[in-house]
Image (tube, rainbow, N blue to C red):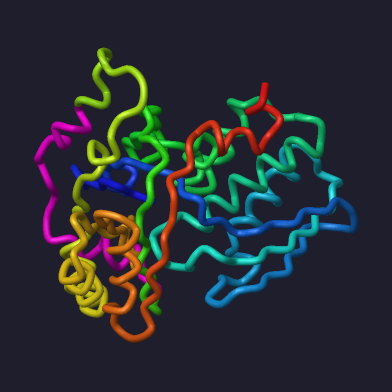
Amino acid sequence: MNLHLQVVGRRPDGYHELRTVFQTIDLEDRIELALGGRGVEIECRGAGLPFAEENLAVRAARLFASRWAPRLGIRLRLDKRIPVGGGLGGGSSNAATVLLALRERCGFPATREELWEAARSLGADVPYFLLGGAALGIGRGDELVPLPEPPLSRLWLAVPPLAIDTGRVFRSLPGLTEAPLAPSIRRLLGPQRRGPSPLGDFLGHNDLQATVFRLYPEVATVYDSLVAAGACWVSLSGSGACLVARFRGARAGELARKAMPPGVELRPVFTLSRRAWLERWPEGRG
């Protein structure tokens, strides 16, 4: 999820220049991968998934095979649990997971640097999921600076029953922000920082939020409901539609569930450290 997202300009390549704080959470899809057969096949469970040709997991498998295992057949089974179009990087995390899994299963034919380059070619958010934890993303979001991580923390994820068109949101931005990074985030980058940082130091703002609320007023309604229910911080994740909230205690979050508009799910999630993410892969344990 994004705990801070600032749009600071437009790049020559057509992308927007971003400053964003990423944080992994314990919400995940399930991917089963088997080798054999011909080409790349995928079986998906979950609503709102793109066609196979557009699925990032399929594109990642095909890219890996074309570069490092041209005769390899790959079968994927995806159980989608991360909301599609929610601003949580579900497709990007799927792509990174497929790259990491194939690298392991095929005997590590690609260097770490080659894998990162492949991830960048798939999408701006994909490289982040090769790192995990708390990180500052700059450029398109694919230039990453690891941040000192917060302790295990509970946040609340509001999931409206709709998907956001990210391209439409960026095309509709009224202007660009020239403000510097939040002071707390600048402090996180300082050389004097050691050890974990309070979660509050990571919580910023989202420059896409006003545009999303204008294009999708039902998301603004969810935001207002969270604030009215006592949330001490609420922000859109990425381009939405999901909103992230912080409450003063688990009890307050549980009570807020009853105040959500019809069809909106409010669920607790926990931050996931970089170590916890990397330990899923042999290279992370080494």
User: In terms of image quadrants, where is residue 204?
Assistant: top left
Q: Quick one: which residue is furthest to the top in this view?
A: 192
Name which quarter of the figure residue 179 lies in: top left
Q: Where is residue 18 in the image (x, y as percent from the top left)?
A: 27, 42
Front in this rendered view, residue 211 or 257: 257
Residue placed at 36% from the left, 41% from the top? 141
Task: Classify residue 250 by image quadrant.
Answer: bottom left
Query: Which residue is found at the position 38% from the left and 45% from the top?
Result: 153
Residue 78 visible? The answer is yes
Magenta-span inclusion, residue 174: yes
Q: Is residue 7 above or below residue 90?
A: above
State the quadrant of the C terminus: top right
Q: Position of residue 136 (x, y in %)?
A: 33, 34
Please state the horizontal and vertical placement of residue 83, each as a whole percent of the image.
Answer: 48, 67
Q: In this view, does 246 lie above or below 113?
A: below
Tell me: 83 left or right of 227. right
x%, y% of residue 59? 63, 54
Q: How many labels does the image show?
A: 0
Residue farthest to the front, as pictured: 251
273 vs 263, left or right, is right
Q: Answer left or right for 152 relative to 209.
A: right
Determine the residue located farthest toward the right in the rendered image. Answer: 37
Q: Specify the segment rendered in magenta.
A: 163-186
Whether residue 11 is visible to the viewer of this picture, yes or no, is no
* Residue drawn at x 36%, y 70% as measured from the top left: 164
Q: Which of 187 and 251 is in front in this view?
A: 251
Q: Is 138 a magenta residue?
A: no
